Image (tube, helix red, strand yellow):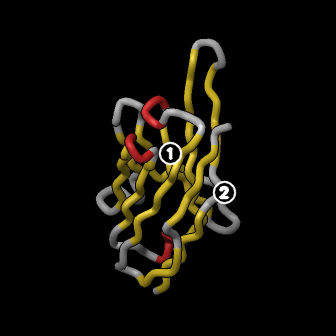
């Protein structure tokens, strides 16, 4: 069974940094596209950044230049480095793993989320 566990959230002042981690078990990390999403109260869940099985990254315009995504396949972990944080970055951050195969199509698995609060 595929499981994702996020960590690294917390309270930080504006301008500060946090690094979120997403540990994936039950699936080979290198065969998945891993995405970080966030959801603020009363808002939809939006993509922040993702990294494909081939290592290609995609960063949302709202965080480009401040956030970076990386993966360590040996540790089955994907990181989201968040710098120059703003109060608008306050949200629950979720990790998603997606793997597409010919036999089963695309399967998604989500973590439970980690709360990031940025104070002004």
Along the viewing direction, whichever of 87 and 54 lies nearer the viewer: 54
The residue at the point 47 percent across, 37 percent down is 29
Q: Is residue 51 left or right of residue 38?
A: left
Identify the residue position indicated by label 2 in the image. Answer: 112
Identify the residue position indicated by label 1 in the image. Answer: 35
As drawn, the residue found furthest toward the top would be: 102
In this view, 97 is above or below 95: above
Task: Indicate the secondary structure of the residue bearing disc 2.
Answer: loop
Q: Earlier in the sequence, mark 1 or mark 2?
A: 1
Q: Is residue 33 left or right of residue 103?
A: left
Tell me the CA gap for discs 1 and 2. Answer: 14 Å
In this view, 74 is above or below 118: above
The residue at the point 47 percent across, 58 percent down is 21
Label 1 with label 2: CB-CB less than 8 Å: no
Q: Quadrant of residue 113?
A: bottom right
Q: Quadrant of residue 3?
A: top right
Along the viewing direction, whichever of 80 and 63 lies nearer the viewer: 80
Identify the image quadrant of the N terminus. top right
The residue at the point 41 percent across, 40 percent down is 51
Q: Give the label, 1 or 2, closer to the camera.
A: 2
Along the viewing direction, whichever of 26 and 92 lies nearer the viewer: 26
Task: Indicate the secondary structure of the residue bearing disc 1.
Answer: strand
Residue 14, position as x, y percentages in the image:
40, 81
The residue at the point 56 percent across, 34 percent down is 27
In this view, 111 is above or below 8: above
Residue 99, position as x, y percentages in the image:
55, 29
As drawn, the residue found furthest toward the left would be: 65
Residue 44, position as x, y percentages in the image:
65, 55
Q: Quadrant of residue 19?
A: bottom left
């Amino acid at each position: 069974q595929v499981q994702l566990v996020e960590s690294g959230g917390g309270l930080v002042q504006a301008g500060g940094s946090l690094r979120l981690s997403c540990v994936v078990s039950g699936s080979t990390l290198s065969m998945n596209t891993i995405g970080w999403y966030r959801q603020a109260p009363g808002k939809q869940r939006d993509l922040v950044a993702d990294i494909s099985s081939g290592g290609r990254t995609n960063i949302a315009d709202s965080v480009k230049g401040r956030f970076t995504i990386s993966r360590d396949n040996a540790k089955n972990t994907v990181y989201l480095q968040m710098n120059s944080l703003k109060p608008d970055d306050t949200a629950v951050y979720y990790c998603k793993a997606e793997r597409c195969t010919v036999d089963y199509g695309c399967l998604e698995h989500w973590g439970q989320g980690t709360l990031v609060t940025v104070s002004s």
